[in-house]
Amino acid sequence: MTMDAKAILITGGAGFIGSNLCEYFLGKGHQVTCLDNFATGHRHNVAEFLNHPNFRLIEGDIRSLETCHEAVKNIDFVLHQAALGSVPRSINDPITSNEVNVSGFLNMLVASRDAGVKRFIYAASSSTYGDSESLPKVEDKIGKPLSPYAITKYVNELYAEIFSKTYGLETIGLRYFNVYGRRQDPNGAYAAVIPKFVMQLMSHESPVVNGDGNYSRDFTYIDNVIQMNELAMLTQNEEAVNTVYNTAFGDRTTLNDMLYYLKLYLSELDQSIADVPVIYGPNRVGDIPHSLASIDKAKQLLQYQPKFSFQQGLKEAVAWYWKNLKKD
């Protein structure tokens, strides 16, 4: 199923996932508005779109209701990616995480409701599963949150459900599982593990693993996430809206295995990377040991079929980092 050209607002559109969504939907002929305050997003992520006739950039903050109202004017679909990610950041500064992830989210819901937006699709999080030990993670079985960040993302789901029931706003939440790929920021205190390790290995620095490396994650390549966002927009199935979906590949990889493949793919480009040693440190507060998604619900209701396995996606990501971020 394809879609006629629509007006799409992507909040956090200068971020890692948001900029990939901007690029994809511009390529499909849609009108794309990007709203970003550049707190964690980057201007270089959207620089190539600025002269595109179908692209509009609004520099603003979702904590301003007025800005949200401006951004949703004449918009058909909202893809809400704007948030302060990172469990450690939320532990260090729970107030700002709550202001952005809860108050900002509520502003976007209110503005979307008032503007008559067709559907509000938002980035939810696998952190919502909290202390639930059951694997694989199934959407209707969650535990208690283990961090302020996890609380904010769970509150998003509760607010979205209320706006669906009370105001008739169609919502779909996508619980992202450890997304990685091109444009993911390798720098900063809260950098995601894959780009951080890639940059360290390319510089012949030892990556530091939290724990013994046996923690596992359902690493999800960016193109699978783009597919889920598009399916959430396209679906005409009434059963498929006003709910949440795991957005993942449906397999898990230990940190040790992830490092094995990183070194394998990078050493094809620079043989000496194979000899860079790995350092092991203490476990990190708030981390869950294992994460694995059931993607049955997305397959059944959205016809989701992830195209990239972990290894396929990692090889693509490594090639992108080597080309774009290798320091000569």
Image (tube, rainbow, N blue to C red):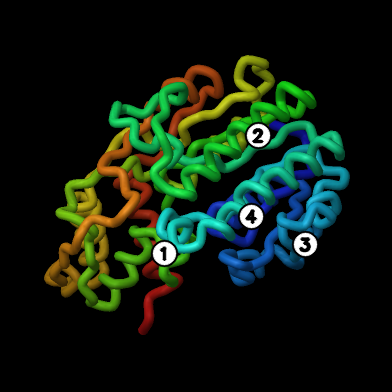
Q: Which residue is mark 4?
A: 99
Q: Which mark is residue 97?
A: none
The amino acid sitting under disc 3 is: Ile
Q: CA distance from mark 3 to mark 4?
A: 20 Å
Hey, what amino acid is under mark 2?
A: Tyr
Do the CB atoms of the residues marked 3 and 4 lie less than 8 Å apart? no
Whether residue 5 is visible: no
Q: Residue beneath label 3, please?
A: 58
Q: CA distance from mark 4 to mark 1?
A: 21 Å
Q: Which residue, as the protein is rendered here, is positioned at the far bottom?
A: 328
Dot in front, 4 or 1? 4
Q: Which residue is mark 2?
A: 159
Does dot 2 land on a helix, a strand or a loop? helix
Task: Name the residue furthest front.
Answer: 95
Quadrant placement of the N terminus: top right
As helix, strand or loop, the secondary structure at mark 1 comes to loop
Residue at image position (16%, 71%) is 276
